[in-house]
Amino acid sequence: MTRNKKYFLLVIALLICGFQTIAQDRNKLEQEKAKLEKEIENINAILQQTSKTKKVSTSELQMLKKQIAQRQQLIKNITIQTNMLKGEINTTQQSISDLQHQITALKVSYAQMLRYAQRNKTSMDKFTFIFSSQDYKEAYRRYTFFRQFGDNQKQKMEQISQKTKELNLRTNELELKKSNQEHLLSAEQKNKEQLDKEQRNKEKTLSTIQKQEKQYQKQLKDKQAKRKKLQQQIDNAIAAEIRKQKELAAKRTAAAKKESKTETPKVAAPAKSTKYTIASTTEDIALSDNFAANKGKFSYPCDNGVVVSTYGIHPHPDIKGVQIENRGIDIRLTKGAAVKAIFEGQVCKVFVDTYGNKGVIIRHGEYMTVYTSLKAVSVNEGDKVLTRQTIGTVATNADNQSEMQFQIWKGYNHLNPTPWLR
């Protein structure tokens, strides 16, 4: 293989890789765009649910902020796609121009061949020219010339036909890209207009809250007091489950020792592990390991929720002097939305919280997940549940807000749910 041929193949390979990368990037951006549009749609549905109450809440403000952030990200996504399409359109236009020049050159060359053939049009002229040769070799060369000339004519016609098809394909591709670009530009303009509207709504809501800051401070402090009572219930239930599992483990150990003094042990001794506090059986340890292995892959405990309060202790983002303490995450949902188990396990507690709503705790070996503020529960204590199984529906409060809390525990330690969720 010559050096020029190797270079040509390398250029072709790089161009193919480049086109594949662009297609992958476009596909990834389109998936992100669809996801952002879905999230904005979910936020709009939740905000619409509480709009009839005409009550302003700090939770609403957080929703508006998240809506604006998602809208800004969506506009950025559309801008990137538009710029990519602009580059692709320029490349396609250049390709069309090159093809047009190639077709023109082929047609000129073909016309020259036709004129030459016209001048030597009779078969007698060809035969006379061949048989007038001085020897056999010259006759063969003349015969080969005419044959190659005919082949070249066919080849030129095929090249013109092929290039014309390619030109039509590129032209259609260009029209499609221009149409997509126009669609994206229109979507970008609409989203910018919607963003302006959402910014005004946020400022209006923030102004209302700031004017009544003392009232909202009191409301938030009352809510925190209720949250502490609820958290105490959860802490007690978690501690009770840990004591229960330790007692069961102790009984299994005693039974295994007793059996070992007689004949073949009938009771399996608990698995030895310094890694776990309450996962004492082989099945519990396997379940715990599977739970840990899925960190970052769990779906949220609902299909279309919006996180309005994050894990940890932090000052309220809008109300001065209010400290938020959250051992999980708060998720806003639409009215009557289903709440689902994030992983397989066993229901260890169903309780009624201080709001008069229900809560569910599911044990996954060493780990436990907590789901609160449920209106109805479809599981009982002791039930085995599957991943993504519906365990209840979210409750709706007097302000027409549907908000649940979700927590993850490992033994006595509460964990930040966010890194665990997809």
Image (cartoon, rainbow, N blue to C red):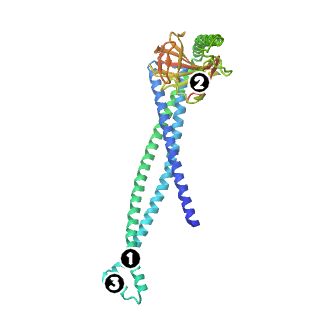
Closest to the observer, 322 or 289: 289
Q: Which mark is drawn over residue 147? A: 1
Q: Identify residue for label 2.
A: 286
Q: Secondary structure at mark 1?
A: helix
Q: Nearer the viewer, residue 336 or 296?
A: 296
Give percent across and percent down for residue 227.
58, 13
**Residue flagged by tag 1: what amino acid is it?**
Arg
- Residues at badges 2 and 1 in contact (C-beta under 8 Å)? no
Is residue 293 shown left or right of residue 174?
right
For disc 2, the neighbor class at 10 Å (few under 14, some 14 to 19, many from 20) is some
Measured in 3D between alpha carbons, the distance from the residue under mark 3 to the one under mark 2, in whole angstroms, is 91 Å
Element type at marker 3? helix
Furthest residue in direction right, as rendered: 274
Q: Earlier in the sequence, mark 3 or mark 1?
A: 3
In the figure, residue 130 lies in which quadrant?
Answer: bottom left
Disc 3 to disc 1, how far (Cα)?
A: 12 Å
**Viewer-closest of 9 and 209:** 9
Amino acid under disc 2: Ala
Residue 127 is marked as: 3
Q: Please, which residue is most extreme toward the bottom here? A: 134
Q: Are marks 3 and 2 in contact (CB under 8 Å)?
A: no
Is 288 rendered above or below residue 160?
A: above
The residue drawn where x is 66% and y is 11% is 261
